[in-house]
Image (tube, rainbow, N blue to C red):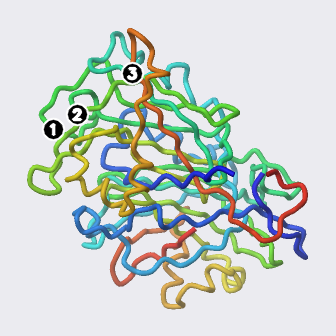
């Protein structure tokens, strides 16, 4: 038996990923189009340890559709969907990012539990040697959030930072890389 | 494709992916100054690998234009510099090909200048080079780009700091867990020793896995040098019990 290959290390995305026609796709933030009746606007700000906005970050999201379906061969459930589920947005000069998407449905777990509606987030930036991962939960799901296996394992004092804040016709989710209210990040 | 945990009471059986923390740099790497205000400081919490984690975007070929894999033909004329081929396979750590996955690259031009408003290095821009490429892996995980060897460039991390020549790579794999952004380096670069980003990977053997290999066999005579770079994403987590249907 030959030796199995070892994984390639991560390196920072650096300051120049936003070349013209580069990683920030023109339709990156638009997981769904404006014609989608259930579309929600998700917006936030990426903030560093000095409280300053991060103007050269890249935020990516990955999620199920509003009925909890995922377009993927490793999802063994029968439901199918054409939902893209993926969004990507470079932060602007004020560190701000946005997505137009739908609120995802709840998801079953292999152990028989249920995960509350959530969106997985990847954060990439100059000065970050590996991606970091967090999750967005929704403020109108208190019961589902209370029994979510991931959220309920987070320090109770920090849980609220993973729940988006309702705004007029939008949800706000700020990401703080350091500090007293550092966003909880996960190892996947 | 991947090892599956034994059938459970819910009937929801998912693949799982090995953790590979020892391959990757620490977020807090003091020699790389920009990590100081950007590396999270609290311990990471383990995220279970449930449906959102073991799936990922299914990005189609419609994302890739006809000349996206050839960075030397995207403008009216040929870019200046040393024409190179960069090719290899995308695999997982079980040695299995990762087919039909999007590979995105970006890089400086041959003078070490990015076509980016934020790049202030006083080296010339090349009107015939944007430095962005993308392609899909084929059914065996192969990818191939035609480009120009990027130049080294200075940066402000420490006195007389220079980045070794590199090409940025972004990969999705088939699952959220497999997402990887990395940099490909060139063999024998004299700038490695002083580069804190390259050395943020502490294991010398792991650093070697970021360095491409010059390959004379696939070098095209009278036309372009060839560099091979295989990229390995996380494979299945070893499980003591596996389904009979599992591929081996």
Discs 1/3, front: 3
How far apart in space, not on screen, are marks 2 and 1 (Cα)?
8 Å
Does A89 appear above or below B201? above
Which callout, 3 or 2, points at the residue further toward the start of the chain? 2
Occupied quadrant, residue A145: bottom right
Discs 3/2, front: 3
Does B220 appear above or below A157? above
Element type at marker 3?
strand
Circle 1 is placed at which residue position? B121
Which callout, 1 or 3, points at the residue further toward the start of the chain? 1
Say which chain tag 2 marks: B
How far apart in space, not on screen, are marks 3 and 2 (Cα)?
19 Å
Circle 2 is placed at which residue position? B112
Picture residue at 37% right of the left edge, 33% below the top = A20
Q: Residue A26 location in percent, x, y?
A: 49, 37
Residue B234 located left or right of residue A67: left
Q: Are marks 2 and 1 on the same chain?
A: yes
Element type at marker 1?
loop
Circle 3 is placed at which residue position? B225
Q: Residue A89 location in percent, x, y?
A: 46, 50
Picture residue at 39% right of the left edge, 17% below the top = B224
Element type at marker 2?
loop
How far apart in space, not on screen, are marks 1 and 3 (Cα)?
27 Å
């Amino acid at each position: 038996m030959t030796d199995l290959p070892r994984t390639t290390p991560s390196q920072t995305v650096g300051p120049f990923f936003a070349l013209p026609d580069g990683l920030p796709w023109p339709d990156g933030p638009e997981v769904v189009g404006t014609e989608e009746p259930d579309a929600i606007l998700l917006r936030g700000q990426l903030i560093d340890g000095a409280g300053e906005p991060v103007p050269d970050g890249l935020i990516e999201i990955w999620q199920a559709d509003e009925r909890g379906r995922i377009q993927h061969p490793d999802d063994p459930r029968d439901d199918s969907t054409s939902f893209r589920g993926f969004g990507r947005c470079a932060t602007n000069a004020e560190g701000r990012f946005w997505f137009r998407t739908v609120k995802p449905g709840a998801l079953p777990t292999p152990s028989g539990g249920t995960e509350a509606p959530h969106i997985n987030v990847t954060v990439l930036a100059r000065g970050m040697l590996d991606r970091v991962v967090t999750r967005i939960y929704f403020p109108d799901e208190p019961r589902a959030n209370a029994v979510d296996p991931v959220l309920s394992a987070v320090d109770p004092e920090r849980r609220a930072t993973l729940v988006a804040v309702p705004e007029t016709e939008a949800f706000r989710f700020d990401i703080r890389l350091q500090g007293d209210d550092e966003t909880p990040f996960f190892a996947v | 494709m991947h090892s599956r945990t034994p059938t459970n009471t819910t009937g929801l059986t998912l693949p799982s992916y090995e953790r590979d923390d020892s391959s990757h740099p620490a977020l807090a790497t003091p020699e790389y100054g920009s990590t100081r205000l950007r590396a999270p400081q609290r311990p990471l919490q383990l995220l279970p690998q449930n449906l959102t984690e073991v799936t990922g975007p299914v990005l189609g070929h419609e994302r890739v234009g006809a000349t996206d894999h050839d960075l030397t033909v995207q403008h009216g004329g040929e870019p200046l510099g040393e024409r190179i081929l960069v090719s290899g396979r995308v695999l997982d750590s079980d040695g299995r090909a990762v087919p039909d996955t999007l590979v995105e690259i970006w890089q400086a031009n041959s003078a070490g200048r990015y076509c980016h408003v934020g790049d202030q290095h006083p080296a010339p821009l090349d009107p015939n080079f944007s430095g962005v490429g993308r392609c899909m892996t084929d059914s065996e995980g192969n990818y191939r780009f035609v480009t120009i060897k990027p130049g080294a460039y200075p940066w402000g991390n420490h006195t007389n700091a220079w980045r070794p020549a590199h090409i940025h790579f972004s990969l999705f794999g088939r699952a959220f867990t497999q997402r990887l952004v990395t940099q490909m380096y060139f063999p024998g670069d004299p700038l490695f020793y002083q580069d804190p980003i390259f050395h943020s990977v502490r294991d010398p053997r792991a650093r070697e896995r970021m360095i491409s290999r010059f390959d004379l066999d696939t070098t095209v005579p009278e036309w372009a040098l060839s560099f091979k770079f295989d990229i390995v994403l996380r494979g299945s987590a070893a499980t003591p019990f596996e389904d009979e249907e599992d591929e081996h």
